[in-house]
Image (cartoon, rainbow, N blue to C red):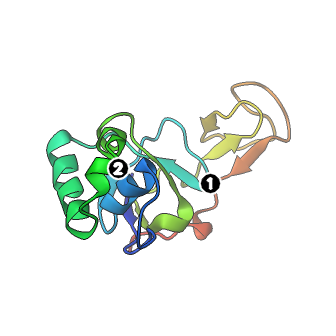
Amino acid sequence: MQLLIKDNISATWCRSDFQVALHALEGERVTVETDHLFRDQYNTAPIGKRRAKRLMAKVAKTHPWSACYFPQAYEILTGCGMRIMSEHVQRVVNDARQGRQRCNYCGKHSEAAGAFCPHCGKGGCLVQFDGNTFPQAK
């Protein structure tokens, strides 16, 4: 599962390490961790160091001071990944949520349809991931 991040989503100036890292990802395709899926947000996999350096160099062209004031942006990209909200996503590629349900009680995912969660046994907690609410790749 991958995301295409929107262009021009960051403010004209960045105020945190996260915003600098998000600015670096503008227009890029990133891989999503599918262990924990949500309706409105995505956890990205860590980005390789070589790619992260290239992305940070792109940010340095428009915000030359960013590396001085926000040195953790590189670590955010290469460390444990980032949480990207749906409003920053242009398109989802190979959406792993299609046909799956998430239990609002235990948070686990399943492909089984039914009234009860196969993991915790609670009833009325399963919510279908709705692919119509996400921008899909064509």
Question: Where residue 137 sits in the image (x, y, percent)?
Answer: 40, 70
Q: Secondary structure at mark 2?
A: helix
What residue appears at the point 65 percent right and 40 percent down from the top-left corner? 112
Sequence-wise, the earlier of marks 2 and 1 is 1
**How many numbered callouts?**
2
Q: In the rendered structure, which amino acid carries the disc numbered 2?
A: Tyr
Residue 104, quarter of picture: top right
Q: Is residue 27 above or below residue 34?
A: below
**Relative to 127, is 34 on the left or the right?**
left
Graded by Cα atoms within 10 Å as few (under 14), some (14 to 19) or many (20 or more), the crowding at tag 2 reads some
Question: Where residue 86 sits in the image (x, y, percent)?
Answer: 55, 62
Question: Which residue has dot 1 on it?
Answer: 39
Which numbered mark, 2 or 1, is in the foreground of this view?
A: 2
- Residue 4 in sight in this render: yes
What residue appears at the point 23 percent right and 62 percent down from the top-left corner? 64
CA distance for labels 2 and 1: 33 Å
**Relative to 124, is 83 on the left or the right?**
left
Question: Which residue has dot 2 on it?
Answer: 69
Q: In the rendered structure, which amino acid carries the disc numbered 1?
A: Arg
Question: Where residue 123 sits in the image (x, y, percent)?
Answer: 85, 35
Question: Where residue 101 sits in the image (x, y, percent)?
Answer: 65, 45
* Foreground of the two, 131 or 45: 45
Q: Quadrant of the image for the C terminus?
A: bottom left
Q: Is residue 55 above or below residue 109?
A: below
- Residue 2 in sight in this render: no
What residue appears at the point 72 percent right and 30 percent down from the top-left corner? 106
